[in-house]
Amino acid sequence: MSLIRHAFTLKWMSYFAVAVVFAVITSLFGLWQWDRRGQKVAEIERVEAHFAQEPVGFFDALAMGQSWDDDLRWTPVSIQGHYDAAKTVLVRTRPRFSQVGFEILVPFQLGTGEWVLVNRGWVPTGEQQDYPDVIPTPPDGLVTVTGRLFASEPIIDGRSAPEGQVATIHLGTLAQLTGVPLDTRAYVALSSEDPSTSPMPALLERPAADEGPHLSYTVQWFLFALLGFVAWGYLLREDYRLVNDVDAPARPRNRTDQDVEDELLDQWEATRG
């Protein structure tokens, strides 16, 4: 039986089907990592495009009636109005600087009467309790806020928070919690305030332009898919060689009576000579 015919036996076609399934699964993981890399690259390009821009008004960036577009993320905006510090809400379980802490959300009323939410920054969890030791208060009176636009976050099922806190920055939930008609499309992450106050929360920082390991993971998953077929081919070849004794040494032929007679005759002829 040839190697090709051996490959088309039921046993080795079954193994080939297993290799195909393995390749499909690993390829899907590879495509998922490729998509994750694409998202990272798009975010890096978005940051690069927006970070050096001059701030615009909130409703210049996001006009009334306009739905949120991810390309607006990191857009710099400048708004003027008053904080309602009495309606401050904390977002819990926010990691930063290798610590877990809280982000401080404060409703902000523009001079034109509309309300937007301002994320004033991050504070660490307290030393003795699951609550910040200090919550910096915003400035009183007329304030100019410069920050960057971010979309409302989704609700996470099963996550709750104590009174005065939320699990995510879901603007619809925050509008109900504060009783303020917030714009539910986007909030402003604070970069600076005028006038400024002290102490200040840790403000939003520019993220590092790091794609992460997604490209190398993509290559690895596709290599795994290829190696499945290589392994199948190697095992097929070894099984074929074993079944057909390809590497077995030549076996000596069994001696017959005729062989013995011929040998004796040759010896007798040699002695006569």
Image (cartoon, rainbow, N blue to C red):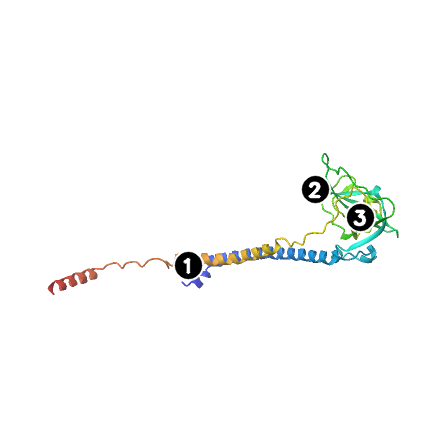
On residue 240, the disc is 1
Q: Earlier in the sequence, mark 2 or mark 3?
A: 2
2 or 1: tag closer to the N-terminus: 2
Question: Residue sitting at 61 percent across and 56 percent down?
Answer: 215
Q: Quadrant of residue 270?
A: bottom left
Q: Secondary structure at mark 3?
A: strand
Location of residue 261 in the rendering, given as x and y in whole percent from the top left corner: 18, 61
- Give percent across and percent down for residue 74: 75, 54
- Measured in 3D between alpha carbons, the distance from the residue under mark 2 to the one under mark 3, in whole angstroms, is 20 Å
Residue name at image x 81 percent, y 48 percent: 193
**N-terminal of the two: label 3 or label 1?**
3
Image coords of residue 88 (percent x, y): 81, 43
Label ID, residue 118: 3
Q: Nearer the viewer, residue 47 or 200?
A: 200
Tell us which disc is closer to us: 2 or 1: 2
Task: For mark 1, give the secondary structure.
Answer: helix
Nearer mark to the viewer, of 3 and 1: 3
Quarter of the picture containing the N terminus is bottom left
**In the image, which disc is placed on residue 100?**
2
Left or right, 234 with reference to 83: left
Q: Residues within 10 Å of mark 2 (few under 14, many from 20)?
A: some
